Image (cartoon, rainbow, N blue to C red):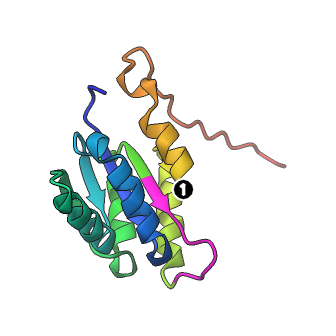
Amino acid sequence: MNKRLTIALVAHDNRKADMVEWAVHNAEFLAHHHLVCTGTTGGLILNAFEERGVFAEMTRMNSGPLGGDAEIAAMVVRKEVDLAVFLIDDLNPQPHEADIQMLLRQCRVHNVPIACNRYSADLMITSTLWDDDSYVPSEPKYVYFNRN
Protein backbone atom coordinates (compact mmCIF):
# COMPACT_ATOMS: atom_id res chain seq x y z
CA MET A 1 0.00 0.00 0.00
CA ASN A 2 1.32 3.40 -0.96
CA LYS A 3 -1.19 5.59 0.85
CA ARG A 4 -0.40 6.43 4.48
CA LEU A 5 -3.46 6.00 6.67
CA THR A 6 -4.43 7.12 10.13
CA ILE A 7 -5.81 4.03 11.84
CA ALA A 8 -7.63 4.16 15.17
CA LEU A 9 -7.22 1.08 17.39
CA VAL A 10 -9.56 0.60 20.36
CA ALA A 11 -10.22 -2.52 22.43
CA HIS A 12 -12.19 -3.21 25.55
CA ASP A 13 -10.37 -4.89 28.44
CA ASN A 14 -11.51 -8.42 27.58
CA ARG A 15 -10.49 -7.88 23.93
CA LYS A 16 -7.09 -6.23 24.47
CA ALA A 17 -5.15 -9.50 24.12
CA ASP A 18 -6.98 -10.12 20.84
CA MET A 19 -6.10 -6.59 19.62
CA VAL A 20 -2.43 -6.97 20.55
CA GLU A 21 -2.27 -10.34 18.77
CA TRP A 22 -3.92 -8.83 15.68
CA ALA A 23 -1.60 -5.80 15.74
CA VAL A 24 1.51 -7.99 16.09
CA HIS A 25 0.30 -10.21 13.23
CA ASN A 26 -0.13 -7.06 11.10
CA ALA A 27 2.86 -5.13 12.52
CA GLU A 28 4.63 -4.79 9.17
CA PHE A 29 1.54 -3.17 7.66
CA LEU A 30 0.71 -1.02 10.70
CA ALA A 31 4.28 0.30 10.99
CA HIS A 32 3.76 2.19 7.71
CA HIS A 33 0.78 4.11 9.06
CA HIS A 34 -0.09 6.52 11.86
CA LEU A 35 -1.86 4.76 14.73
CA VAL A 36 -4.22 6.50 17.11
CA CYS A 37 -5.10 4.42 20.14
CA THR A 38 -6.90 4.69 23.40
CA GLY A 39 -4.37 4.83 26.23
CA THR A 40 -4.14 1.32 27.62
CA THR A 41 -4.58 -0.39 24.27
CA GLY A 42 -1.89 1.81 22.74
CA GLY A 43 0.51 1.06 25.57
CA LEU A 44 0.05 -2.69 25.16
CA ILE A 45 0.55 -2.52 21.39
CA LEU A 46 3.60 -0.27 21.79
CA ASN A 47 5.18 -2.73 24.27
CA ALA A 48 4.47 -5.69 21.99
CA PHE A 49 6.00 -3.85 19.03
CA GLU A 50 9.08 -2.79 21.00
CA GLU A 51 9.67 -6.40 22.10
CA ARG A 52 9.78 -7.32 18.41
CA GLY A 53 11.83 -4.34 17.25
CA VAL A 54 8.90 -2.76 15.40
CA PHE A 55 8.56 1.02 15.33
CA ALA A 56 5.18 2.59 14.66
CA GLU A 57 4.13 6.22 14.87
CA MET A 58 1.43 6.29 17.54
CA THR A 59 -0.68 8.88 19.26
CA ARG A 60 -2.17 7.69 22.53
CA MET A 61 -5.38 9.26 23.78
CA ASN A 62 -6.92 8.84 27.21
CA SER A 63 -8.18 5.41 28.12
CA GLY A 64 -11.72 4.73 26.94
CA PRO A 65 -13.52 5.29 30.25
CA LEU A 66 -11.60 8.56 30.69
CA GLY A 67 -12.68 9.95 27.31
CA GLY A 68 -10.42 8.23 24.77
CA ASP A 69 -13.36 6.92 22.73
CA ALA A 70 -14.79 10.45 22.62
CA GLU A 71 -11.42 11.90 21.57
CA ILE A 72 -11.20 9.47 18.67
CA ALA A 73 -14.84 10.19 17.73
CA ALA A 74 -13.91 13.89 17.51
CA MET A 75 -11.03 12.98 15.18
CA VAL A 76 -13.49 11.06 13.00
CA VAL A 77 -15.72 14.14 12.78
CA ARG A 78 -12.71 16.24 11.74
CA LYS A 79 -11.87 13.63 9.06
CA GLU A 80 -8.55 12.78 10.73
CA VAL A 81 -9.16 9.02 10.82
CA ASP A 82 -9.18 6.80 7.71
CA LEU A 83 -10.02 3.49 9.37
CA ALA A 84 -11.04 2.35 12.85
CA VAL A 85 -10.66 -1.08 14.43
CA PHE A 86 -12.74 -1.35 17.58
CA LEU A 87 -12.75 -4.75 19.28
CA ILE A 88 -15.81 -4.51 21.51
CA ASP A 89 -16.60 -6.74 24.47
CA ASP A 90 -20.21 -7.53 23.65
CA LEU A 91 -20.54 -9.91 26.60
CA ASN A 92 -20.07 -7.40 29.42
CA PRO A 93 -21.61 -3.99 30.15
CA GLN A 94 -19.31 -0.99 29.74
CA PRO A 95 -19.53 2.02 32.07
CA HIS A 96 -18.88 4.41 29.17
CA GLU A 97 -21.45 2.93 26.77
CA ALA A 98 -22.52 6.38 25.54
CA ASP A 99 -18.96 7.13 24.34
CA ILE A 100 -18.76 3.75 22.61
CA GLN A 101 -22.00 4.35 20.76
CA MET A 102 -20.86 7.87 19.86
CA LEU A 103 -17.67 6.55 18.25
CA LEU A 104 -19.57 3.90 16.30
CA ARG A 105 -22.19 6.44 15.22
CA GLN A 106 -19.64 9.02 14.08
CA CYS A 107 -17.85 6.42 11.98
CA ARG A 108 -21.15 5.53 10.31
CA VAL A 109 -22.26 9.16 9.82
CA HIS A 110 -18.88 10.28 8.45
CA ASN A 111 -18.35 7.20 6.28
CA VAL A 112 -15.24 5.95 8.09
CA PRO A 113 -14.79 2.18 7.77
CA ILE A 114 -14.95 0.53 11.18
CA ALA A 115 -14.09 -3.09 11.86
CA CYS A 116 -15.44 -4.64 15.03
CA ASN A 117 -13.75 -8.03 14.67
CA ARG A 118 -10.41 -9.29 13.40
CA TYR A 119 -11.80 -10.79 10.21
CA SER A 120 -13.36 -7.52 9.04
CA ALA A 121 -10.18 -5.65 10.10
CA ASP A 122 -8.07 -8.00 7.96
CA LEU A 123 -10.40 -7.52 5.00
CA MET A 124 -10.25 -3.75 5.34
CA ILE A 125 -6.48 -3.40 5.63
CA THR A 126 -5.92 -5.66 2.62
CA SER A 127 -8.37 -3.84 0.37
CA THR A 128 -6.89 -2.56 -2.88
CA LEU A 129 -9.30 0.39 -2.78
CA TRP A 130 -6.93 2.33 -0.49
CA ASP A 131 -4.54 2.90 -3.41
CA ASP A 132 -7.13 3.12 -6.18
CA ASP A 133 -7.18 6.78 -7.14
CA SER A 134 -10.27 6.24 -9.28
CA TYR A 135 -12.25 5.10 -6.23
CA VAL A 136 -13.77 7.96 -4.27
CA PRO A 137 -16.17 6.91 -1.52
CA SER A 138 -19.43 8.78 -1.84
CA GLU A 139 -20.64 10.85 1.06
CA PRO A 140 -23.63 9.37 2.87
CA LYS A 141 -26.90 10.83 1.66
CA TYR A 142 -29.52 11.36 4.30
CA VAL A 143 -32.93 11.95 2.78
CA TYR A 144 -35.71 13.00 5.10
CA PHE A 145 -39.23 12.20 4.05
CA ASN A 146 -42.23 14.17 5.17
CA ARG A 147 -44.51 11.59 6.77
CA ASN A 148 -47.61 13.80 6.87
Residue 24 in magenta stretch: no
Q: Look at mark 1 in the image and give the residue it sits on.
A: 116
Which structural element holds mark 1? loop
- Is residue 21 shown left or right of residue 33? right
Is residue 121 in sight in this rendering?
yes
Is residue 78 in sight in this rendering?
no
Residue occupying the point 15% across, 51% down = 55
Give the crowd class for mark 1: few <14, some 14-19, many >=20 residues within 10 Å. Answer: some
Residue at the bottom extreme of this rendering: 95
Magenta stretch, residue numbers: 85-94
Label total for image = 1
Residue occupying the point 48% across, 80% down = 96
Q: Return the residue nearer the eye: 68 or 148.
A: 68
- Is residue 117 shown left or right of residue 10? right
- Is residue 104 shown left or right of residue 133? right
Q: Is residue 119 above or below residue 143?
A: below
Location of residue 22 in the rendering, given as x and y in whole percent from the top left corner: 41, 54
